[in-house]
Amino acid sequence: MPVPLSPFFNLPTELADLPQDIQETILAVQEKAGFVPNVFLMLAYRPAEFRAFFAYYDALMERGSDTLTLAEKEMLVVATSAQNHCLYCVVAHGALLRIYSKNPLIADQIAINHRTSPISERHRVMLDFALYISLEAGELTEDWVKALEAVGFTREDIWDIGAVCAFFGLSNRMVSLTGTPPNQEFYLLGRLPKTT
């Protein structure tokens, strides 16, 4: 029996009930991933918000950065989502982190405690800053700029780090609000070598 997408909201489960452009977006994701991530159906509950959310997601996460890699962006999502107790984002973005980094262990290690993870000093400083801006006042200071620039981040990267953390703070809260579970498929992605 499938897990309900939300115990609190009557979220859509049939693509045919959604606006055409949202159907097309979801079908494109399904074709690429092999399944429909539950967060797409959750956000389709409000079509205008779905469109805005994924437009910003694409602008933030899919484009290149000065030096911030896709794996580093996913590290940010995993570390901050774990602190926000968002199982969906830890599991889903943990899968992306494993894939982008080609490391089957790193997502779990970062989710539990990035400070004890086998990561570079660059990544440790980045994640320290991410948790600071996500969980504390979040004010950028000269000391943080110096620390981040010392490990190779640019001002544009610092903006991106802040934007990723802020955006996924929103995502974490919406997933928690709705009680949307992670898809079972995410749990194994990136853990084992691909078979052809």
Image (cartoon, rainbow, N blue to C red):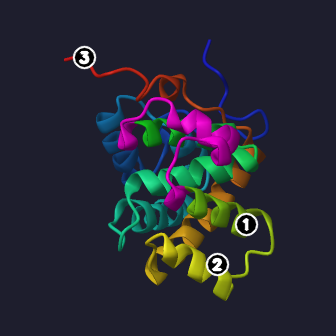
Tell me if residue 132 comes above or below residue 186 in the rendering. below
How packed mark 2 is, by other alpha carbons closer than 10 Å (few <14, some 14-19, many 20 or more), is some
Q: CA distance from mark 2 to mark 3?
A: 43 Å
| Contact between labelled residues 1 and 2, with CB atoms less than 8 Å apart | yes
Q: Nearer the viewer, residue 115 or 133?
A: 115
Q: Main secondary structure of the magenta part?
A: helix
Q: Residue furthest top?
A: 1
Identify the disc placed on residue 195.
3
Residue drawn at x 74%, y 38% is 179
Of helix, strand and loop, which one carries label 3? loop
Regarding residue 11, the answer to whether it shows in the image is no
Which tag is nearer the camera, tag 3 or tag 1?
1
Of the residues under marks 3 and 1, which one precedes in the sequence? 1
Which tag is nearer the camera, tag 2 or tag 1?
2
Magenta run includes residue 104: yes
Residues drawn in magenta: 99-123
Tell me if residue 187 comes above or below residue 195 in the rendering. below
Image coordinates for residue 76, horizontal then vertical, percent: 56, 56
Image coordinates for residue 175, horizontal then vertical, percent: 68, 46
Identify the disc placed on residue 132.
1
Left or right position of 178 against 41: right
Image coordinates for residue 85, horizontal then vertical, percent: 75, 43
Magenta run includes residue 90: no
